[in-house]
């Protein structure tokens, strides 16, 4: 990689891979979740994530690149950690708290990536791409807030 655009494309491929892995992982989390409110938040975010994949494909098209993935070890590690937790925790209330924590770890990763990509798109003069990336960034922030709210209002109390 020699240019900011090269780094932008590489990171776009990274997050494209990450979103695809998240689409695969969320149904397992939904299935394991006990609290209806947690399942509902995760289901809504699964639908959002599928739309985010489509947005990324649109960004690839805007920059005349074929959609491609770059293995994202960071998100792979976060998903692996979540899967291990889901296998190890027996108490369903405690598991819900763990699912929230795992979900927020992924959201924070995505927030960092999308914030960076949007800033780079702006720097590169890719206004439409920046707008799409910022739209996804706001969705990731909202998902993080929703997870925090349900944790504080109910899930953490149930786990305690």
Image (cartoon, rainbow, N blue to C red):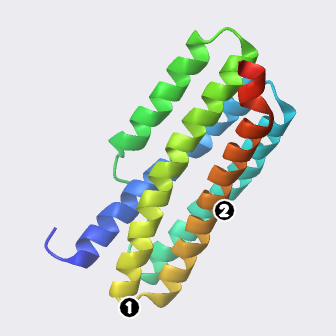
Residue at the (47%, 65%) spot, across then down: 114
Residue at the (71%, 11%) spot, across then down: 91
Q: Residue 63's quadrant in the figure?
A: bottom left
Report if the CB atoms under discs 1 and 2 are less than 8 Å apart: no
Tell me the quadrant of the picture where the C terminus can be found. Answer: top right
Percent across and percent down for residue 84 are: 51, 19
Q: CA distance from mark 1 to mark 2?
A: 24 Å
Q: Pick whichever, 69 or 11, lies toward us.
A: 11
Tell me the element at label 2.
helix
Q: Which labelled disc corresponds to residue 125?
A: 1
Left or right: 116 in relation to 79:
left
Against 29, residue 119 (above or below) is below
Q: Pick whichever, 13 or 117, lies toward us.
A: 117
Against 8, residue 139 (above or below) is above
Write down the residue under mark 2.
51
Tell me the quadrant of the picture where the N terminus can be found. Answer: bottom left
Within-10-Å neighbours for mark 2: few <14, some 14–19, many 20+? some
Q: Is residue 66 visible?
A: no
Percent across and percent down for residue 44 are: 77, 50
Q: Residue 158's quadrant in the figure?
A: top right
Residue at the (72%, 23%) spot, across then down: 32
Left or right: 148 in relation to 41:
left
Q: Nearer the viewer, mark 1 or mark 2?
A: 1
Percent across and percent down for residue 72 are: 36, 46
Q: Is residue 78 visible?
A: yes
């Amino acid at each position: 990689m020699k240019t900011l655009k090269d780094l932008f494309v590489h990171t776009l491929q990274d997050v494209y891979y990450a979103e695809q892995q998240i689409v695969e992982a969320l149904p397992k989390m939904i299935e394991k979740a006990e609290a209806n409110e947690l399942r509902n938040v995760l289901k809504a975010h699964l639908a959002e994530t599928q739309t985010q994949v489509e947005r990324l494909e649109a960004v690839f098209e805007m920059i005349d690149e074929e959609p491609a993935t770059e293995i994202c070890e960071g998100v792979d590690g976060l998903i692996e950690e979540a899967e291990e937790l889901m296998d190890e925790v027996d108490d369903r209330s405690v598991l819900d708290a763990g699912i929230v924590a795992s979900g927020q770890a992924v959201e924070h990763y995505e927030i960092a990536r999308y914030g960076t990509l949007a800033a780079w798109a702006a720097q590169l003069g890719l206004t439409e791409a920046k707008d799409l990336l910022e739209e996804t960034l706001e969705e990731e922030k909202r998902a993080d807030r929703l997870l925090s709210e349900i944790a504080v209002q109910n899930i953490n109390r149930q786990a305690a």
